Amino acid sequence: EANSTLSEPRVRIPFDTLRATLAAIFERHGTSAGVAAVLADNCAAAERDGAHSHGVFRIPGYLSTLASGWVDGRAVPQVHDLAPGAIAVDARNGFAQPAYMAAHAQLVAKARANGIALLAIRDSHHFAALWPDVEPLAEQHGLVALALVNSMASVVPHGAARPLFGTNPIAFAAPRAAGWPPLVFDLATSSMAHGDVQIAAREGRLLPEGTGVDAHGQPTREPRAVLDGGALLPFGEHKGSALSMMVELLAAALTGGNFSFGFDWSGHPGAQTPRTGELVIAIDPQRTGAADFAARCEALVSAMADAGQTRQPGGQRHRQRADSLAHGVPLAQATWDELQRLAGG
Ligand code: NDP
Ligand code: PYC
């Protein structure tokens, strides 16, 4: 399978070659060329940055979902210019990233014109890392950006008895002074991303204490018990649970998308992509009345370093990115062989 293993032998694949191969796979398995290009960019970038839970590991899930008829790989998103600071996109049961791209330029223009703008995406499937939805807004456009997406009922709210929330990530990006990549974090509000539980199961690793419960609601460290009828817990008990609730409200209720518990994919065996919503908020730091945001950002970064913080969020991804761009994206040989087979090569 495409996500088979991290064991040797390994190869280094040029980023553009990986991206082109992934685009060929998507198109060969039922997406339009445009959707294939957007998903391939996203998935290859995650693999390049070492974000393994949402890199090529996800290809079998994308393909089984497309084969199940649950998602429309050829959907053409409808963009609605709602207000000076608001855009809505109906993804029409397509992937979230093409819907986002359809409104990206408008979001930037509105944030510049108004100081703040939001993009509300509904009826969309987000099966990816979230940082690609905010990092370019900070890096290329100097905007502060926040993105939230809800997923599938797999997390038990704090104090509750059954799963309701999704793993519901939050991503944030802030531009830094010239020459520095933006400060970016991207984190699931669950104790662990569902994808990482799947990877732990594949690799035969136990989960940390407090990650999840089995089908009887009992704490377990067995990834298969979490995946087969069990559930994850929020990170940080009531605090992560409250953030996850907020994501349901902002990414679903505010956009018109489904809640994580609000869709039924049982008629589509093989479906894995959640059909929900996404909210992106972009803020122009030049339009808030504060002096020189970039300088304040540098002051904070220096203070964190002085306090002893040696690793910043996003730092590891950028180190892996530099390595991948210099030497090729590392993949298991078996994984690369399988990707080429799927691409029809
Ligand atoms: P992690 O816990 O791996 O990382 C969360 C953030 O913390 C990252 O920005 C990471 O930076 C940073 N970080 C990690 N370790 C440290 C450290 N020691 N010091 C400082 N910063 C640190 O992410 P998750 O497992 O929570 O999420 C993984 C991915 O899964 C995300 O990309 C998320 O968007 C995706 N996801 C997608 C969903 C969807 O519905 N589409 C649902 C749930 C998750 P760095 O990247 O540099 O390590
Ligand atoms: O890893 O939790 C996850 C996830 C859900 C949807 C896409 N990724």
Image (cartoon, rainbow, N blue to C red):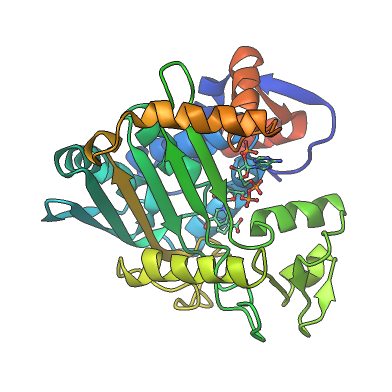
* Identity of the residue drawn at 83% across and 64% down: 209
Whether 140 is drawn above or below 100: the answer is above
Screen quadrant of the C terminus: top right
Q: Residue at x 49, y 42 (%)?
A: 131
Q: Residue at x 54, y 46 (%)?
A: 186
The answer to which quarter of the image holds residue 56 is top right
Residue 317 lies, in percent from the top left, at 61, 32
Question: Residue at (19%, 54%) from the top-left corner?
Answer: 86
Give x and y (percent) for residue 236.
67, 64
In the figure, is residue 49 to the left or right of 251? right
Answer with the quarter of the image where residue 319 lies. top right
- How many discs appear? 0
Position of residue 80 measured from the top left corner of the image (x, y, whole percent)? 16, 56
In screen coordinates, is 341 left or right of 286?
A: right
Q: Is residue 39 visible?
A: no
Residue closest to the eye, 153 or 189 = 189
- State the residue in front, 228 or 219: 219
Using the image as rendered, state which of residue 50 and residue 30 is in the foreground.
50
